[in-house]
Image (cartoon, grey):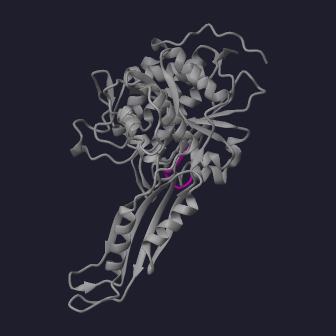
C-alpha cells in the first residue's frame, strides 16, 4: 500500500492541552505499587486509559491477573497492512511516595512554572499521556500510523511485572501476535555533553536477580559461646557481597556510547578509565555509570527477636543487576562470596537484553529527533534497571527505550525517577509528542 502524504505537520498546539490534561489526570490516580501483590489504583488507571482508547475505536480489553491488578491492551490500525505491528507500551503503577518528604502533594498533579509535579510524572504517566495524546490526534485528523499499533498499559512493572507484562506474555502471548518491535520508557531523553545536546536511546538493559540469603545455625542463650551463629555467618556473607568490587566490563552498547562521548570531547577513550566520559555525561552518568559493571547490593537483613536469644536462622536480601551474558557467572560469584552455610535462592530473575543500534526503527527514531532538534546527536545506552521490554523479549520482540524528551540542561532527570518532587516540563512532553508522531509515519486513511 502506498502512503498518502500527510498534510498535518506536528506542532505544540496539536498536543499541549491533551498531554497536559492526561498527564495530570493520570497522576491524580494513586496507583501505588508496594510489591508482593500489594497495590492500589491500577484498575482505575486502566479504566481511564481504556475510556480514551474506546473513543479512538481501539477496542481495548481490560484484564486482571489478580483482583485489581489490571492491564489494558488495544490496537490502532495502520495504513500499511504489509508491515508488522509495533508495540507501544507503558505501565500504570508507580512507586510509593511519602507526602511528608515532598514540597507538594505527590498525587496533586500541580502545574508550577510550566512543570507538572507528581509521582509518575516521569515514571511513567507522562509517556502514557504522550502515547494517548498522539493517538487522539491521529484519530481526530483522520490519520493512521504506517504500522498497526498494539498499545499496552501494564500493571506491576515497578515490582518486576509478575502481575503485568510477565503474566500476559506467559498466559496470553496471542495478544502480541505478529509484533516485531516495541517502544517504551526511559531512553530518548536529552543530556548535555560539553555543550553538545545528545539523546540517549536505550538499546540494552541489565538483568535482574533478586536474591534471598539464608543461614541456619544453632539457637541458644545469648550468654553462651556459640561458634555456630547464623547471624555472624550471614553478616560475613553480606559484608563480602556488599564490598565486592566488580570489574569494568563493556558490552557493545556501553563501549559504543563511551567511544562516541569521547569523540564529542575530542579525546581518545581509555577503557581502563571511563571517569572523564562519565563526568562529561553530567547527570546522565547516574544511569550510565552503573552499566559498566555488574552490581550486587544488600538491601535487607532479618534475624532474631530478643537480645539474649541467639536465633537459629538469619536471612537477607540482595539486589543483583547483571550485564548481558553474565547471569551464571554473577550467581556463582555470589555463592562463592557467601561461603559455606549460606543458601542463596532466586526470588525473581529477568535476563539482560541488548539489541542493535541499527535498523529501520532506529533510523526512524534518530531521524525524528533530528527533525525536531537538528543539531543533536543520538547515542545508544544501557539502562541499569529493568523495563517491560524484558518480558516482551521472551516472544522475540526487539524492544527499545524511547521516551523522547528535550530537557533543560540543568534538570537532574535521572534523580527524578523514584525521587522526591518528581516533575516533568510541559515543553518536554510536547516535544515528545511531536517526535513520537513522526516515528509512527502517519498518513491519511
In this view of the protein, which residue sits in the foreground, 381 or 98?
381
Image-based side of 137 in relation to 26, left or right: right
Q: Is residue 399 above or below residue 295?
A: above
Residue 66 sits inside the magenta stretch: yes
Identified at 68% across, 9% down, the residue is 5
In this view of the protein, which residue sits in the foreground, 290 or 116?
290
The image position of residue 356, as x and y in percent, is 63, 37
The image position of residue 355, as x and y in percent, is 62, 40
Image-based side of 210 in relation to 84, left or right: left
Count of numbered badges drawn on the protein? 0
The image position of residue 1, as x and y in percent, is 79, 18
Residue 433 sits inside the magenta stretch: no
The image position of residue 228, as x and y in percent, is 35, 87
Please identify the quadrant where the C terminus is shown: top right
Q: Is residue 441 above or below residue 339?
A: above
Identified at 44% across, 81% down, the residue is 341
Asked if one can make out residue 63 in the rendered structure from this viewpoint, the answer is: no
In this view of the protein, which residue sits in the foreground, 58 or 401?
401
Magenta stretch: give its range.
Answer: 65-71
Q: Is residue 18 above or below residue 238?
A: above
Asked if one can make out residue 339 in the rendered structure from this viewpoint, the answer is: yes
Image-based side of 431 in relation to 76, left or right: left
Furthest residue toward top: 7
In this view of the protein, which residue sits in the foreground, 408 or 322?
322
Identified at 49% across, 33% down, the residue is 128
Main secondary-structure element of the magenta-colored stretch: loop
Amino acid at each position: 500500500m502506498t502512503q498518502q502524504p500527510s498534510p498535518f505537520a506536528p506542532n505544540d498546539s496539536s498536543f499541549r492541552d491533551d498531554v497536559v490534561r492526561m498527564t495530570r489526570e493520570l497522576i491524580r490516580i494513586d496507583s501505588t505499587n508496594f510489591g508482593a501483590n500489594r497495590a492500589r489504583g491500577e484498575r482505575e488507571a486502566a479504566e481511564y486509559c481504556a475510556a480514551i482508547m474506546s473513543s479512538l475505536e481501539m477496542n481495548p480489553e481490560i484484564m486482571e491477573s489478580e483482583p485489581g491488578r489490571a492491564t489494558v491492551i488495544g490496537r490502532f490500525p495502520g495504513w500499511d497492512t504489509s508491515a508488522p505491528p509495533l508495540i507501544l507500551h507503558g505501565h500504570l503503577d508507580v512507586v510509593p511516595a511519602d507526602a511528608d518528604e515532598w514540597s507538594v502533594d505527590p498525587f496533586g498533579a500541580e502545574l508550577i512554572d510550566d512543570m507538572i509535579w507528581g509521582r509518575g510524572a516521569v515514571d511513567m504517566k507522562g509517556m502514557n499521556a504522550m502515547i494517548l495524546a498522539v493517538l487522539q490526534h491521529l484519530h481526530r485528523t483522520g490519520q493512521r500510523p504506517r504500522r498497526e499499533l498494539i498499545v499496552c498499559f501494564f500493571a506491576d512493572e515497578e515490582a518486576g511485572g509478575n502481575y503485568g507484562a510477565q503474566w500476559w506474555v506467559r498466559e496470553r502471548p496471542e495478544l502480541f501476535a505478529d509484533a516485531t518491535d516495541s517502544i517504551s520508557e526511559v531512553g530518548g531523553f536529552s543530556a548535555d555533553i560539553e555543550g553538545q545536546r545528545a539523546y540517549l536511546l536505550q538499546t540494552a538493559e541489565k538483568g535482574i536477580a533478586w536474591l534471598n540469603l539464608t543461614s541456619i545455625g544453632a539457637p541458644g542463650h545469648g550468654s553462651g559461646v556459640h561458634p555456630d551463629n547464623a547471624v555472624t555467618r550471614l553478616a560475613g556473607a553480606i559484608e563480602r557481597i556488599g564490598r565486592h568490587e566488580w570489574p569494568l566490563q563493556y558490552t557493545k552498547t556501553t563501549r559504543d556510547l563511551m567511544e562516541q562521548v569521547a569523540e564529542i570531547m575530542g579525546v581518545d577513550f581509555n577503557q581502563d578509565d571511563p571517569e572523564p566520559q562519565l563526568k562529561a555525561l553530567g547527570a546522565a552518568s547516574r544511569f550510565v555509570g552503573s552499566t559498566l559493571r555488574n552490581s550486587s547490593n544488600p538491601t535487607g537483613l532479618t534475624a532474631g527477636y530478643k537480645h539474649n536469644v541467639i536465633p537459629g536462622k538469619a536471612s537477607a536480601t540482595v539486589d543483583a543487576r547483571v550485564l548481558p551474558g553474565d547471569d551464571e557467572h554473577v550467581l556463582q560469584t555470589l555463592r562463592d562470596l557467601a561461603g559455606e552455610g549460606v543458601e542463596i535462592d532466586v526470588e525473581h530473575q529477568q535476563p539482560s537484553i541488548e539489541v542493535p543500534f541499527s535498523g529501520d526503527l532506529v533510523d526512524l527514531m534518530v531521524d525524528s529527533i533530528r527533525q525536531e532538534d537538528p543539531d543533536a546527536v543520538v547515542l545508544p545506552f544501557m539502562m541499569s534497571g529493568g523495563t517491560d521490554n524484558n518480558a516482551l523479549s521472551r516472544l522475540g520482540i526487539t524492544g527499545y527505550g524511547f521516551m523522547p524528551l528535550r530537557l533543560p540542561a540543568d534538570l537532574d532527570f535521572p534523580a527524578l525517577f523514584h525521587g522526591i518532587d518528581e516533575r516533568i516540563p510541559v515543553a518536554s512532553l510536547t516535544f515528545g509528542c511531536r517526535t513520537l508522531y513522526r516515528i509512527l509515519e502517519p498518513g491519511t486513511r
